[in-house]
Image: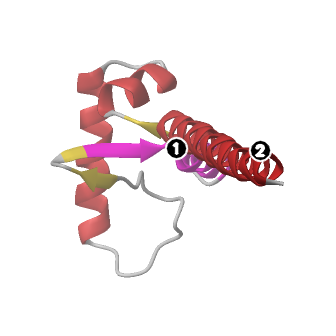
């Protein structure tokens, strides 16, 4: 009876440790996948210029022109201008939003 109780106790302890490690590993892999998806959707200024197949100085000219245009407008479509988010002092651009901006400008100018 004592041996059976000890075996059962060791089995429960081992199973708990094993299940805990599996849960940790699956959570880590989900986090890494989400991080990859987010990272691939956000582009730096250089990556955005490359995505648009233009130089970084040309991309800056577009941004400056849009900034000047935006100052004179109070209401505009969300795809009229290239939007960005600021993370730790760096601007990042959404690949999806860039695609929408391209489509908007193809058909509305």
Residue at x 49% of width, y 26% of height: 52
User: How far across and how far down the image is residue 16, in percent?
Assistant: 67, 51
Number of marks drawn: 2
Nearer to me, 5 or 77:
5
Spatial CA distance of label 1 from label 2 is 47 Å
Nearer to me, 87 or 68:
87
Nearer to me, 82 or 86:
86
User: How far across and how far down the image is residue 76, in percent?
Assistant: 47, 73
Nearer to me, 109 or 29:
29
Residue at x 69% of width, y 45% of height: 10
Residue at x 30% of width, y 26% of height: 58
Quarter of the rendering containing residue 69: bottom left
Q: Tell me if residue 103 is in the magenta stretch.
A: yes
Residue at x 62% of width, y 45% of height: 17
Circles 1 and 2: CB atoms closer than 8 Å: no
Q: Is residue 2 shown left or right of residue 84?
A: right
- Which numbered disc, 1 or 2, marks the residue closer to the eye? 2
Q: Which residue of the protein is positioned furthest toward the bottom in this rendering? A: 74
Colour mode? secondary structure
**Which residue, given by chain and number where applicable, does mark 2 sit on?**
7
Instruction: Label 2, secondary structure: give it.
Output: helix
Placement of the N terminus among the 4 image quadrants? bottom right
Q: Is residue 106 shown left or right of residue 38?
A: right
**Which residue, given by chain and number where applicable, does mark 1 sit on?**
38
The magenta stretch is: 91-107
């Amino acid at each position: 009876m004592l041996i059976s109780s000890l075996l059962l106790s060791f089995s429960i302890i081992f199973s708990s440790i094993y299940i805990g490690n599996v849960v940790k590993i699956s959570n880590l892999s989900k986090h890494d996948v989400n991080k990859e998806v987010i990272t691939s959707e956000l582009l730096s200024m250089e990556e955005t210029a490359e995505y648009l197949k233009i130089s970084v100085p040309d991309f800056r000219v577009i941004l400056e022109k849009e900034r000047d245009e935006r100052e004179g407008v109070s209401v505009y479509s969300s795809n009229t201008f290239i939007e960005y988010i600021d993370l730790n002092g760096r601007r990042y651009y959404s690949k999806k939003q860039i695609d929408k901006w391209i489509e908007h400008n193809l058909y509305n100018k």
